[in-house]
Image (cartoon, rainbow, N blue to C red):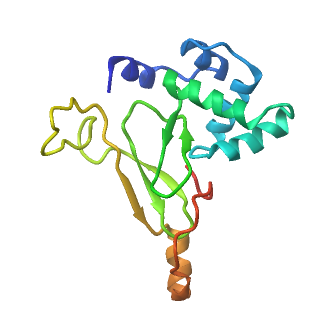
Amino acid sequence: MTETERMRADEPPRTLADSIRAAGLKVTAPRLAVLRVLDQAPHSTAERLFATVRAELPSTSLQAVYGVLAAFTAAGIAQKIEPAGSPALFERRVGDNHHHIVCTRCSAVHDVDCAVGQAPCLTPAHASGFAVHTAEVTYWGLCPDCQAATSASPSLLSAPAPLSNKGAR
C-alpha cells in the first residue's frame, strides 16, 4: 500500500463530493450519482450502474457512466475488477489489496481481506524482474444460499451463471 493509499484508508468518511474533489476531479451530477450507487452496490457492472443512475438522471448515457468509471479508477477512488468470464465490476474499496470470492452458481461476489500479511499479499516465486505492488486473487466456490439449494437438489449444479449483483458486498 502506498503512503497516499494508507492515508486515504485512515481518513474519516467524507461526503461524496469531497471524495471527488480530493481526487482532483470536478464534481458533476453524473459523478455524484455513480459514486452514490457504487457506495450502495459494490461489485456493480457499468450497465447496472447506468440503469440505476439513469433513473435519477434520465439524460445520462452509458458512455458517460463509462467515462466516469474511467476517471474514478484513474484517480484511485474506484477499482475495476475482472473475474474470469464476466463483465468488469466496479467498487469503491481501494488501496488495501483485498481479494474477491465468486459463487460459481449464482455469481455473487464478496470481498475477502488479504490472504496473508501486508500488501502485496502474495510474493511470486519468480517475479521476472517486476516490482510487484499488488496481487489479485479470486476465490471460486458456492455461496451459502447455493450450497443449501444444491444440497436440496443436486441437479442445480450446472454451468456458472453470468455475474450479477446478487449478494454483492
Q: Is residue 15 left or right of residue 78?
A: right
User: Is the residue 152 above or below the residue 96 in the image?
Assistant: below
Give x and y (percent) for residue 43: 56, 46
Give x and y (percent) for residue 51: 76, 44
Give x and y (percent) for residue 30: 74, 26
Kindly identify the residue that appears in the image at 21 percent across and 29 percent down.
131
**Along the line of sight, the residue nearer the viewer: 84 or 145:** 84
Q: Which picture quadrant has residue 19?
A: top right
Kindly identify the residue that appears in the image at 39 percent across and 17 percent down.
4
Please give the count of numbered marks on the rendered protein.
0
Give x and y (percent) for residue 140: 41, 62
**Along the line of sight, the residue nearer the viewer: 90 or 95:** 90
Q: Quadrant of the N terminus?
A: top left
Q: Residue furthest left?
A: 125
User: Is the residue 98 above or below the residue 132 in the image?
Assistant: below
Q: Which picture quadrant has residue 95?
A: top left
Kindly identify the residue that appears in the image at 32 percent across and 44 percent down.
114
User: Is the residue 152 above or below the residue 103 in the image?
Assistant: below
